[in-house]
Image (cartoon, coloured by chain):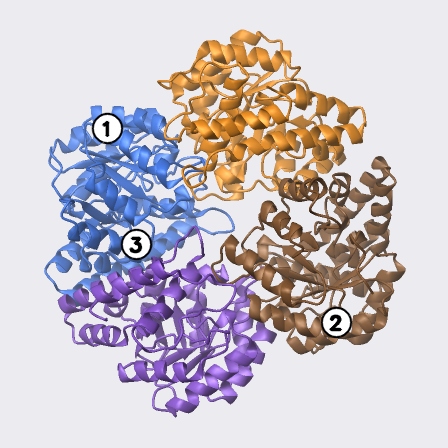
Chain colours: A brown, B purple, C orange, D blue
Amino acid sequence: MTLPTPLTGVVPPVCTPLTPDREVDVPSLIRLVDHLVNGGVDGLFVLGSSSEAAYLTDRHRRLVVETVTAHVGGSVPVLAGAIDMTTPRVLDHVEYVTAAGADAIVVTAPFYTRTHPAEIARHYRLIAARSSVPVFAYDLPVAVHTKLDPELVLELAAEGVLAGLKDSSGDLGGFRAVVTGARARPDITGFSVLTGSELFVDSALALGAAGAVPGLANVDPEGYVRLDRLCRAGDGERARAEQERLCALYGMVGAGDPARMGGSSSALGAFKAALFLRGVIACAATAEPQVPLSEEEVERVGKHLAAAGLL
Amino acid sequence: MTLPTPLTGVVPPVCTPLTPDREVDVPSLIRLVDHLVNGGVDGLFVLGSSSEAAYLTDRHRRLVVETVTAHVGGSVPVLAGAIDMTTPRVLDHVEYVTAAGADAIVVTAPFYTRTHPAEIARHYRLIAARSSVPVFAYDLPVAVHTKLDPELVLELAAEGVLAGLKDSSGDLGGFRAVVTGARARPDITGFSVLTGSELFVDSALALGAAGAVPGLANVDPEGYVRLDRLCRAGDGERARAEQERLCALYGMVGAGDPARMGGSSSALGAFKAALFLRGVIACAATAEPQVPLSEEEVERVGKHLAAAGLL
Amino acid sequence: MTLPTPLTGVVPPVCTPLTPDREVDVPSLIRLVDHLVNGGVDGLFVLGSSSEAAYLTDRHRRLVVETVTAHVGGSVPVLAGAIDMTTPRVLDHVEYVTAAGADAIVVTAPFYTRTHPAEIARHYRLIAARSSVPVFAYDLPVAVHTKLDPELVLELAAEGVLAGLKDSSGDLGGFRAVVTGARARPDITGFSVLTGSELFVDSALALGAAGAVPGLANVDPEGYVRLDRLCRAGDGERARAEQERLCALYGMVGAGDPARMGGSSSALGAFKAALFLRGVIACAATAEPQVPLSEEEVERVGKHLAAAGLL
Amino acid sequence: MTLPTPLTGVVPPVCTPLTPDREVDVPSLIRLVDHLVNGGVDGLFVLGSSSEAAYLTDRHRRLVVETVTAHVGGSVPVLAGAIDMTTPRVLDHVEYVTAAGADAIVVTAPFYTRTHPAEIARHYRLIAARSSVPVFAYDLPVAVHTKLDPELVLELAAEGVLAGLKDSSGDLGGFRAVVTGARARPDITGFSVLTGSELFVDSALALGAAGAVPGLANVDPEGYVRLDRLCRAGDGERARAEQERLCALYGMVGAGDPARMGGSSSALGAFKAALFLRGVIACAATAEPQVPLSEEEVERVGKHLAAAGLL
């Protein structure tokens, strides 16, 4: 399908269900996609951070994108991450995800290397020149250790290099600069500014964002869709209540003991445990070398689901 | 060949010469390897950071390791980087570099993800269990954004998970803790602690390090080999003079204007410009999206070479 | 006066006008206070970061707080920063600012030292035990290099140690956790959560914040007061327009050339240049070792004022 | 006394003994100074980080410097820290420490504020212009969150602004650049480059450093003096053995449980516990809000002392 211009609404970063021996669990992935589409989402983002893209081999990644694009058959747009360190490696991912039918690609700044704004611009220009589908910038300083500069994003938007931004920086001031800049500049049209936050989708939409890409929407797609619709309807009070319910639910990401595991293990482990407890996926395993949640930690996830009315 | 236990001496991280259209320049790579081996180095490390591994596609990486192992034919040990974000992706690289005949692999902690010491340990244990050749840990906080803990390194050495450490952290105190710990513990034998620094190889060897992996040894292998031999002969005064000559030469990494480019572009661009000026490689191009050095910046590199007696 | 519980509305961090030889310019300070109070603000915060507290000697700080408390005479509450590295040094500042009549003190976590959440808790408990006025926590990771944990803030609020939070972390998710936590917990009452951001006061108020402490309110107090009143009236559309006007005005903080000066010099220099251009203060000098804005940079500030209708 | 040019040898940063109610324990301080001077040290550095300067009020600081200068009466040079956020505040400290007879002052770059190399240069120039005694730069990125640039240090040395550098950055490459630069440049004479590391004093001296300022020398001054003399005598092997004994002793800084306290509490707590166990000071208390070591943690310190032959 052609990507809506701009892409709006709720576009969950789709978790990647794994079997106990860490292969992609295709039937579970299809059930998860159905769970999301039936929940009313406006698009799907595969191979992002919440998809454990950093932990998936190229073979796994290819299988994920092929499975999802084939299954949805154009009913909703599919964005695919092309997450790697530098331009040449990203371009290899772009090739197979677009061959599989992804409607857009999502790309971070270079990482692992010591980079510079001029190199980031060069990176996106080269990728856009070689990609057959639109390019979204992915701002994720916690992983990439560089923050995308709002002025640079707007410049690349005006050039037609970027079609949108997924902002997971947590920096609402910079996010707003992109939103209002894109609206104000006559040389920018159809640019889609999406927040990657779970915790202030209402704020982002109120200031003019096009939509949201919240990892927690895997667990509760109806909640985020409801939130989106309430915001668009201008019902601030009910939107805030829904957002606060989702913030409480998000507390599940702290289920894992920080003395035993890192933040990815805990957050992604919690999302998958929740999907397992809700009956969506067959196995809650996360990829290596993440530490699995203990039984007690999974129980904590269950309590968050119950408190949110999801069990 | 079987890797010496411990591996000692000078083991340059081999630059990857590229053609103007950014393919691997195989004839130049072979000339570079000859330049290093003829310079007296004790091993070669391909696909490390100075090799622009982060910028090479899997196809490029495979070609590099196959070219080098075939060319040296066991005359010196070849270590190969398996640089990627997490365990499953690293294991894919391990497969082809060992199939190509690498004598050891060099692996960082997970990056891009939010990680934890327990996950780092799990990462190395899983990789060692699956690798047919010894595993070196690669400590490079500037890229990985995690520092390997000396106690963890020693624990993994004692378990037989790690055969050595390439330490590019710049933290000489932690480096020394590994060197003296490995010497003191009866459950650790043949563990090879190598410094990745260009600037204090003499200090590292004096406190007991096994060897060095200096990127600048691409440019002046004889200099680092001479330094290594002077240190082993206990000739501190001449060692220090040689080290200081190399420190001055290392100033070339600042050739690129920091207003125009990042540290990788400048340092790797300078190494390649120097190799080109010395007639070793045919083209000084660095991989995308790095910014090329200007003519004036290349002249600065030339001045460093001249001052060090290398032009 | 007794501090309102909770303190709400706009509470500007008052700039500290200096003479050309870097003494406190008392007449200008009094004019600035009048400018703010006449602008409708709900309180004043002296000796914060925008007040250049880090650059003021104890003698200067004492003069500032005495001048302001004497001049307002209880007509609006005066909060005073007690900014220093650790508990004993902070307590020395607490003594003279409370003697001068400050209605509350504002205190960061320890800085310069390597600290720990348990030490941060101990710090605030000791200070509250010794202070005769309420204590606000000041969350400013860009200066303090530690982020206050929302759970810890709520725990200290429940204990009665903290009366409020000034959050300049930029992390709206964590801010929201404090706002909703303080509202939900029956053991917390009258806790005042204030945003230190200039850029999303509308968002902060919409999610339930008590008020704002924006440095830019020195330049345009009427604007922020209007924004606050529009938010409280539930007029989201006009609030957003006002906020966006203020965001554009805030662009002045980038007036200084980053090749010549740091962020403090540029931002504080711009605020003072604007106050000078608006005729509020007699001299735009900032404290040493900040670099002064050039004439051309001051002109840029003037253009921001003109565009916002303030010149 | 006049400061030797350059200052060389072992210059411990003197701990500040406190009474149980956190007043300066003057008799203990005098005993500690005697312990150091009798141990053969070449100078004393009061009011540095190991002195808990960040935790001492101005009244405490003044008492410390007056006590020490009066007691040593010129028998060894006394350097005094003037640790504060910015130029005007540092100058206030400079005044009383020089009035008390300090022979040199030790000053960091500005902290808490967002600074810039041009502002750091301005800071040191203003301080040197106002100080009656020589100025040492104190490079401590873990506290100051800025690293001093070697080129800037050399420039300020050539101008006569700086008389020396205390480098606690852990970056031996940058340290070496200052040492060799100061030796090579004809416009720099008598510049004293001192390492703040406990762990590689032998390496620093071997590459040409003037001396060392190790916090651990409070506990074992004889050890560091012996190390210094062995290095100067060119006895590398025995120097290395002595350094390794001191590295093992330094392990005491990890005595405190990191789940309960930060790095300052643990390291400074261990030094003071060791001084108490060795009978030098009357009470091991550290300043607020540091967490005290438990009995069991103090026992760990005792084991380190015993293993090093100091109990």
Q: Amino acid at mark 1?
A: Ala
Q: Amino acid at mark 3?
A: Gly
Q: CA distance from mark 3 to mark 2?
A: 48 Å
Quarter holding the C terminus of chain B?
bottom left
Element at badge 1?
helix
| Residue B67 percent location from the top left of the image | 45, 87
Q: Where is residue B14, by image quadrant?
A: bottom left
Is residue A161 rendered to the left or right of residue C270?
right
Q: Nearer the viewer, residue D159 or A216?
A: D159
Number of the label disc, if any, that sits on residue A65: 2
Is residue D197 rendered to the left or right of residue A219?
left
Element at badge 3?
helix
Q: Nearer the viewer, residue D153 or D17?
A: D153
Is residue A15 rendered to the left or right of residue A228?
left
Number of the label disc, if any, that sits on residue D232: none
Whichever of callouts 1 and 3 sits on the residue coming sooner in the sequence is: 1
Disc 1: which residue: D129
| Residue D139 percent location from the top left of the image | 32, 45
| Residue A50 percent location from the top left of the image | 69, 61
Disc 3: which residue: D174
Q: Are marks 1 and 2 on the same chain?
A: no
Image point (31%, 66%), residue name: B198
